[in-house]
Image: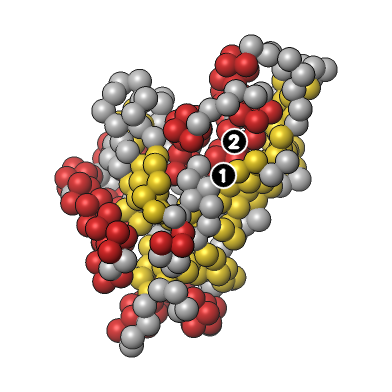
């Protein structure tokens, strides 16, 4: 088989109902489901080039040589499927800070598996790509799809039912997102490390899990009906509960900076004054403001004025992962 390089792009996603904790760390099986939105402006572009003359996989991340250890198992599975044992040169670039709480692993692994599927001509469907992406990073399963996405935790031991699926496309409800970047530094506690520590030491973690089914149902209904008031309630509650469980771990995990907290107060103040906006924060210090259509510019101006906010990025809901060449 003659293999050709392939390039794919995938957008970062933001969880409205959070993913925090795993029922199986080896397979990246989530302890509970989650619901997210995929963004158009924050994305990863990745090229996978199988090469007969390479002795090992090579990875270039944002222009710098990087250890390919984390991506090698993903490529191994595509090599096994195709029957072609070719090492790969992988070049990947994010147009936003890497490892800083902006879901770079989600868009990164979604782009990687989409490009590898094309390069090795394995022909996986979206469900298969979602499972492959999940094996690299739990949240990456959602970035295979665009718009509004739900990730199922599944019940099977092998993880074959733990994958994402589309809830609604972006035009269904063209919400806007404003991201307030409070630092470009990588976070001190990686998401997987934070999840595992929270699960094993936080007395709040069982309560976090017990409320997930209700949160998922509320979010589904809010999206289907385009009910922003209900979406605000479940989105902010889910984020605060996730961080509360991490704060209660021993020792506690604190992802927020002073500017993070200032943004949360400002977003609530804007909403009280009539702006359609709510907040969410993933495992990191960056704040994501989810806005009704037409509200993003106003929110961006206000957040940009907050001391400690280094950059504000405006985004739309976008498509799922796709091959671009």
Q: Residues within 10 Å of mark 2 (few under 14, many from 20)?
A: many
> Is residue 256 visible in this depiction of the protein?
no
Which quadrant of the figure contains the N terminus? top right
Q: Nearer the viewer, residue 262 or 2?
A: 2
Which label is found at residue 114? 2
Point out residue 82 in the picture as x, y percentages from the top left corner.
62, 16
* Residue for point 47% across, 29% down: 128
Q: Which residue is mark 1?
A: 321
Asked whether the residues under the numbered discs 2 and 1 touch, taking CB atoms below 8 Å apart as contact, a structural biologist would say yes
Q: Nearer the viewer, residue 41 or 205?
A: 41
Which quadrant of the figure contains the C terminus? top right
Residue 97 drawn above or below residue 306: above
| Mark sitting earlier along the chain (2/1) | 2
The answer to which quarter of the image holds residue 3 is top right
Whole-angstrom CA distance, mark 2 to mark 1, is: 7 Å
Horizontally, residue 84 falls left or right of residue 277, namely: right
Q: Secondary structure at mark 2?
A: helix
Point out residue 176 in the picture as x, y percentages from the top left corner.
47, 69
Q: Secondary structure at mark 1?
A: loop
Horizontally, residue 136 falls left or right of residue 9, namely: left
The answer to which quarter of the image holds residue 323 is top right
């Amino acid at each position: 088989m003659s293999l050709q390089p392939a390039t794919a792009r995938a957008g970062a996603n933001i969880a409205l109902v959070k993913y925090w904790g795993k029922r199986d760390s080896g397979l990246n099986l989530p302890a509970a489901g989650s619901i997210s939105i995929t963004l158009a402006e924050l994305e990863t572009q990745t090229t996978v080039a199988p090469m007969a003359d390479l002795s090992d996989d090579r990875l270039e991340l944002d222009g710098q040589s990087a250890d390919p250890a984390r991506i090698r198992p993903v490529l191994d599975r595509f090599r096994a499927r195709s029957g072609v044992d070719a090492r790969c040169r992988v070049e990947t670039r994010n147009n936003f800070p890497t490892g800083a709480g902006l879901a770079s692993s989600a868009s990164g692994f979604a782009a990687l598996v989409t490009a590898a599927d094309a390069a090795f001509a394995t022909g996986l469907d979206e469900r298969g790509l979602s499972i492959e992406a999940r094996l690299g990073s739990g949240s990456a399963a959602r970035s295979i799809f665009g718009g509004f996405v739900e990730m199922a935790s599944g019940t099977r031991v092998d993880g074959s039912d733990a994958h994402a699926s589309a809830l609604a496309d972006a035009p269904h409800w063209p919400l806007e997102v404003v991201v307030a970047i409070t630092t470009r530094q990588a976070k001190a506690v990686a998401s997987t490390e934070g999840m595992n520590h929270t699960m094993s030491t936080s007395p709040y973690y069982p309560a976090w899990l017990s409320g997930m089914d209700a949160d998922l149902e509320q979010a589904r209904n809010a999206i289907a009906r385009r009910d922003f008031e209900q979406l605000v309630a479940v989105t902010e509650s889910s984020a605060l509960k996730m961080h509360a469980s991490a704060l209660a771990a021993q020792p506690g995990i604190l992802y927020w900076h002073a500017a993070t907290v200032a943004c949360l107060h400002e977003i609530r103040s804007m909403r009280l004054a009539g702006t359609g906006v709510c907040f969410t924060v993933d495992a990191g210090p960056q704040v994501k403001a989810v806005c009704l259509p037409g509200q993003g510019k106003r929110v961006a101006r206000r957040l940009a004025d907050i001391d400690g906010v280094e950059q504000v990025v405006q985004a739309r809901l976008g498509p799922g992962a796709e091959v671009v060449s």
